[in-house]
Image (cartoon, rainbow, N blue to C red):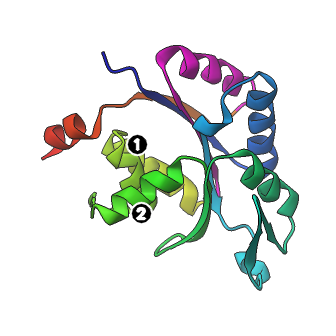
């Protein structure tokens, strides 16, 4: 039986998202199952650029320690420029989901690259659009993927960090999900 779920927490500010990541890490949660995405908080500061040094990404701006720490902890990192949203910083498995959706030309009416990545793993279209609106309004999305038990445990931890929103989705394998949406 397929047992793959995801909890998605929405935070208003980076300090809340950072607290949530730290609580998951100190509880022993597998950090390779964690993703975070947000608009580039430095776009208005006219950042000169981003650069990578080994397993860390460095950039100039106000919350560099926050993103620099995430790039070192989480599996995969990228910067995407999304029409209608702007530059997005993404860390964790979501990077691969977005790239896979873009390479597979997954299109969801009204959704961009992040939405296509989320839809491709089985998150319902209405939730995808809600998460993209959260990104457009400068919120932070924190996603934790795993078994029912892992996501349940993560959800309890995240609930204690007071997210604006916290939802759990049961994901379907891409073949089943794609067939159901055709």
Q: Is residue 109 left or right of residue 157?
A: left
Position above or below: 126 against 169: below
145 drawn magenta: yes
Percent coordinates x, y for residue 51 in the rendering:
75, 75
Position above or below: 11 against 156: below
**Residue 63 visible (yes or no):** no
Give the quadrant of residue 164. top right
Q: Is residue 127 left or right of residue 66?
A: left
Which residue, given by chain and number where applicable, does mark 2 sit on?
113
Q: Residue at x 68, y 46 (%)?
A: 74
Tell me the element at label 1: helix
Tell me the element at label 2: helix
Magenta-tinted stretch? 138-162
For mark 2, does the 10 Å Cα neighbourhood hold few (<14), some (14 to 19), or many (20 or more) residues? many
Q: Residue at x 75, y 23 (%)?
A: 28
55 drawn magenta: no
Q: Nearer the viewer, residue 175 or 132?
A: 175
Which residue, given by chain and number where applicable, does mark 1 sit on?
127
**In this view, the mark in front (1 or 2):** 2
Question: Which of the two discs, 1 and 2, labels the residue nearer the N terminus?
Answer: 2
**Residue 177 visible (yes or no):** yes
Percent coordinates x, y for residue 43 in the rendering:
70, 77
Q: Residue at x 42, y 63 (%)?
A: 113
Give the quadrant of residue 86. bottom right
The answer to the question of whether label 1 and label 2 lie on touching residues, with beta carbons closer than 8 A, is: no
Percent coordinates x, y for residue 130 in the rendering:
45, 48
For residue 22, the mark is none
């Amino acid at each position: 039986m397929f047992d793959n779920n995801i909890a998605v927490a929405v935070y208003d500010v980076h300090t809340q998202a950072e607290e949530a990541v730290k609580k998951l890490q100190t509880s022993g949660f597998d950090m390779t199952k964690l993703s975070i995405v947000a608009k580039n908080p430095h776009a208005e500061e006219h950042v000169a650029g981003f650069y990578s040094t080994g397993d860390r990404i460095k950039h100039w701006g106000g919350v560099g320690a926050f993103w620099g720490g995430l790039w070192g902890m989480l599996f995969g990192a990228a910067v995407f420029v999304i029409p209608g949203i702007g530059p997005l910083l993404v860390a964790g498995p979501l990077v691969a989901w977005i790239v896979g959706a873009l390479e597979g030309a997954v299109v969801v009416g009204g959704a961009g690259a992040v939405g296509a990545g989320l839809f491709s793993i089985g998150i319902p279209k209405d939730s995808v659009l809600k998460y993209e609106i959260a990104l457009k309004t400068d919120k932070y999305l924190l996603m934790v993927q795993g078994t029912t038990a892992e996501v349940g445990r993560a959800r309890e931890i995240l609930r204690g960090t007071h997210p604006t929103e916290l939802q759990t989705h049961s994901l379907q394998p891409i073949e089943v999900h794609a067939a159901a949406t055709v």
